[in-house]
Amino acid sequence: LAKTTQPISMDSYEGQEVNITCSHNNIATNDYITWYQQFPSQGPRFIIQGYKTKVTNEVASLFIPADRKSSTLSLPRVSLSDTAVYYCLVGDIPFRRGGYNKLIFGAGTRLAVHP
Amino acid sequence: GAVVSQHPSRVICKSGTSVKIECRSLDFQATTMFWYRQFPKKSLMLMATSNEGSKATYEQGVEKDKFLINHASLTLSTLTVTSAHPEDSSFYICSAGTGDGYTFGSGTRLTVV
């Protein structure tokens, strides 16, 4: 599994756009990029997943450059409830391999949104 | 979406006793489940992988005799912390493969006194 590097923490204010970048220099051809969100005392929650270019859903956007060695999670107009830890994970998605990879979590990025 | 129900959400036990944590897949069959431990302000650390009907595979450094994992059915996996000690106090989280991804339980806060 490709190792990922993220900023340890970030601060923002309500209404701002937040971009969290993850480096994954050793990403493999079959690897996808997945982001999870974790609130205190809760399990991680899936946010978004992508392979290349741009993916957008109702919660966030994921930007992946052509070389795929990094990715950026973009949270539009954050609110206080977006205060959480965000994890970037890289690996082959389950159904492609017929089995389930271990998900190895890095340190994550602790986002604090201020009023 | 696929849901994993984890119970209890929090438990306090006396040192030396055993505690069982359950994870149930509510609307899908979980052939593979993962168990994580998370200390305050730290990331999730994978403890073991369990496949239904097979023995669990433990990560290096995790005591298999202390953390007993049972995955006897496609909808239930349990983690039993045996002879718990204060250093076992942590947040335990299960995760299941859902077919096209993973879903996580809500976690169990274990406090050993």
Image (cartoon, rainbow, N blue to C red):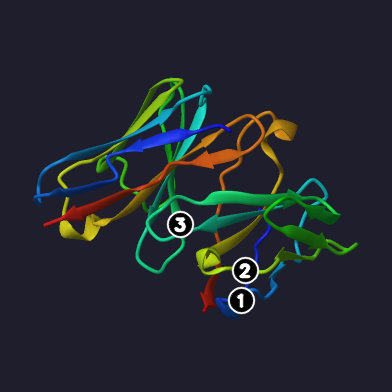
Q: Nearer the viewer, mark 1 or mark 2?
A: 2
Which residue is more in the foreground, A83 or A98? A83
Q: Is residue A17 visible from the viewing direction of this image? A: yes
Give the chain of mark 2: A
Q: CA distance from mark 1 to mark 2?
A: 18 Å
Q: Position of residue A89 (x, y in %)?
A: 64, 56
How packed mark 3 is, by other alpha carbons closer than 10 Å (few <14, some 14-19, many 20 or more), is many
Residue type (three-letter) at the residue carrying disc 3: Leu
Residue type (three-letter) at the residue carrying disc 1: Pro
Residue type (three-letter) at the residue carrying disc 2: Val
Q: Say above or below: B98 vs B83.
A: above
Q: Residue at x 24, y 51 (%)?
A: B110
The residue that label 2 is drawn on is A78
Q: Quadrant of the N terminus of chain B?
A: top right
| Disc assigned to residue B44 | 3
Q: Secondary structure at mark 1?
A: loop
Q: Position of residue A16 (x, y in %)?
A: 67, 76
Q: Earlier in the sequence, mark 1 or mark 2?
A: 1
Q: Secondary structure at mark 3?
A: strand
